[in-house]
Image (tube, grey):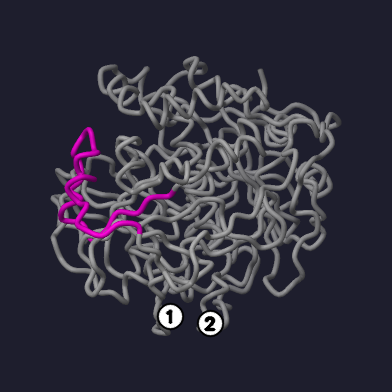
């Protein structure tokens, strides 16, 4: 047992991707366990510091964090005080953004990222230095009240440096993302770990975009000793795990040292006293996850150097030459505001039956061209592209023949995989037809080589692939919203069919995300913006 017993990760992949239809059927046939957890985690008996309101309506260009966007210009400098920058970062990064009312408001509470049934298991914690009325310490972001709750007072930058294996002297703050599993697992049982990792990745991607618009740079850490991390934040080990950490610093400063981590020592943090805070829990004080869930949750944890990645992943090269690529046109220079895109972002109606309307070719390219832009993390050296590939099934895009394509950053365009209209075969790969691909503009698939990734990272590979796929998916969702279309993240597909139709099986790739992009049909609900 443990991170390097790869049969555990292989089994979880088989059950949650290749046999997902069986798990969905099981979920549909069972009642949720107890009452729904609250969509917001609110600590009791701690000091709470309200964040400044009257936030900027505009954030700057949605593409400003991407190196390939030449027209980025200067990021938004309107937010000057540390408290106001923090308030903007948290609200636009993962804030409570919309409340739906009306007969179609099945899941009324929305944030800046998609979430399965709007359960939002991701939680944000922060290390903040002393600033104004805020003492130095570890905080939790109280999304419901747009405030930060102090859960451990003191200077902990040294402990975080030890935990992440990085020099954080230039970091002005550190954002830490956890997953509070029961907020999702009460409904989805063993399948929940996949959803939790996907959502956490989307939050990582969103925070990086918002931070970039505010003149900050985030370097992402996915590898750290899990139990000491939980001890620092006072997390209950059976119900909440840290998934990622983002040290933030001014964008103009040099990259943090020691981001790539192949092995590491034990960061015990034994000197820290135990800490347990209570929070509002209508579901009761305890619950038990099923065996499938605990198999992956407990056996992808890292304790010390022997559990970390044993080598750096190999750099994959495109097997095709540039002559076979359909090149992308020059990037648009018209501004696309990130704030407006995040407020407009939506996943469509519960039953996603969009309006059949052609997507302009220029909009298509602006949606897909930045999806796999490089970023800095501890999985690969330097600034590198995420470890997932983007495959595009085009149905209705002006000037682009229908077919299956693979987006290639290396050659700056699309490689043709197969020509023809594949909307009906891909629609047939949906066991539950709760979205209409035949009226969509395109379907996007994010895929990875799980066997190779697990050879490098152990069972942690399952978490890492879904985190990075989530990061890319959020870019696609926000860029779609910036161009007036909805992006529906959807896991309810038959993996074997997708692998055959998109021809992923030839490259031994597994599809981890399906995203339908289309013009949403007006629903029977009204979205009320939540503004601080």
Residue nearest the viewer, comparing 207 with 448 = 448
Residue 108: x %, y % from top left: 28, 44
Residue nearest the viewer, comparing 71 with 402 = 402
In the rendered image, which quarter is residue 190 located in? top left
Q: Secondary structure at mark 2?
A: loop
Residue nearest the viewer, comparing 60 with 470 = 470
Q: Is residue 302 magenta?
A: no
Which residue has dot 2 on it? 70
Q: Residue at x 79, y 63 (%)?
A: 170
Q: Residue at x 13, y 61 (%)?
A: 356
* Pointer 1 or 2: first along the chain: 2
Q: Residues in magenta?
A: 417-446
Left or right: where 178 falls relative to 127: left
Determine which of the numbered discs, if any, sits on residue 331 in the image.
1
Residue 21: x %, y % from top left: 30, 27
Quick check: marks 1 and 2 in contact, CB under 8 Å? yes
| On screen, residue 15 above or below 118 | above
Determine which of the numbered discs, if any, sits on residue 240 in the image.
none
Q: CA distance from mark 1 to mark 2?
A: 8 Å
| On screen, residue 5 above or below 312 | above
How many neighbours does mark 2 have within 10 angstroms: few (below 14), some (14-19), or many (20 or more)? few
| Mark count | 2
Left or right: where 444 falls relative to 305: left
| On screen, residue 330 above or below 183 | below
Q: Is residue 431 magenta?
A: yes
Q: Secondary structure at mark 1?
A: loop
Residue 507: x %, y % from top left: 47, 46
């Amino acid at each position: 047992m443990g991170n390097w017993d790869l049969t555990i990760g292989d089994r979880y992949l088989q059950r949650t991707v290749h046999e997902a239809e069986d798990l969905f059927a099981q979920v549909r046939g069972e009642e949720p366990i107890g009452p729904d957890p609250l969509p917001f985690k609110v600590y009791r008996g701690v000091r709470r510091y309200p964040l400044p309101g009257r936030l900027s309506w505009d954030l700057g260009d949605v593409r400003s964090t991407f190196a390939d966007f030449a027209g980025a210009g200067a990021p938004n400098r309107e937010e000057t005080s540390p408290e106001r920058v923090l308030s903007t970062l948290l609200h636009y990064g993962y804030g409570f953004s919309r409340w739906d009312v009306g007969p179609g408001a099945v899941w009324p509470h929305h944030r800046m990222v998609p979430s399965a049934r709007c359960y939002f298991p991701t939680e944000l914690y922060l290390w903040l230095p002393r600033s104004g009325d805020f003492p130095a310490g570890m905080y939790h972001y109280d999304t419901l009240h747009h405030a930060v709750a102090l859960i451990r007072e003191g200077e902990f930058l040294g402990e975080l440096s030890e935990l992440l294996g990085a020099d954080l002297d230039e970091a002005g703050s550190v954002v830490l993302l956890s997953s509070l599993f029961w907020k999702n697992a009460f409904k989805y049982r063993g399948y929940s770990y996949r959803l939790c990792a996907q959502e956490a990745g989307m939050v990582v991607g969103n925070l990086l975009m918002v931070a970039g618009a505010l003149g900050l740079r985030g370097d992402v850490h996915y590898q750290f000793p899990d139990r000491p991390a939980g001890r620092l934040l006072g997390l209950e080990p059976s119900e909440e795990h840290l998934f990622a950490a983002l040290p933030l610093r001014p964008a103009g400063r040099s990259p943090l040292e020691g981001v790539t981590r192949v092995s590491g020592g034990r960061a015990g943090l034994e000197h820290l006293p135990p800490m347990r805070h209570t929070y509002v829990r209508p579901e009761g004080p305890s619950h038990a996850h099923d065996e499938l869930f605990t198999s992956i949750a407990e056996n992808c944890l890292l304790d010390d150097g022997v559990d970390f990645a044993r080598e750096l992943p190999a750099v994959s090269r495109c097997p095709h030459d540039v002559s076979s690529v359909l090149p992308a046109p020059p990037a648009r220079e018209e501004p696309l505001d990130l704030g407006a895109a995040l407020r407009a972002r939506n996943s469509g109606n519960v039953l996603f039956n969009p309006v059949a309307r052609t997507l302009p070719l220029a909009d298509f390219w602006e949606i897909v061209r930045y999806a796999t832009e490089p970023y800095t993390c501890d999985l690969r050296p330097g600034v590198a592209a995420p470890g997932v590939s983007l495959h595009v099934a085009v149905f209705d895009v002006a000037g682009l023949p229908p077919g299956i394509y693979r987006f290639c950053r290396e050659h700056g365009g699309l490689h043709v995989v197969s020509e023809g209209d594949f909307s009906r075969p891909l629609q047939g790969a949906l066991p539950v037809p709760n979205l209409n691909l035949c009226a969509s503009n395109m379907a996007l698939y994010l895929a990875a080589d799980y066997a190779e990734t697990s050879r490098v990272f152990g069972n942690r590979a399952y978490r890492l692939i879904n985190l990075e796929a989530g990061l890319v998916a959020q870019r696609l969702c926000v860029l779609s919203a910036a161009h007036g279309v909805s992006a529906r993240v959807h896991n309810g597909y038959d993996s074997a069919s997708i692998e055959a139709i998109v021809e992923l099986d030839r490259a031994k790739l597994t599809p981890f995300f399906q995203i339908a992009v289309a013009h949403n049909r007006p629903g029977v609900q009204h979205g009320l913006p939540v503004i601080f």
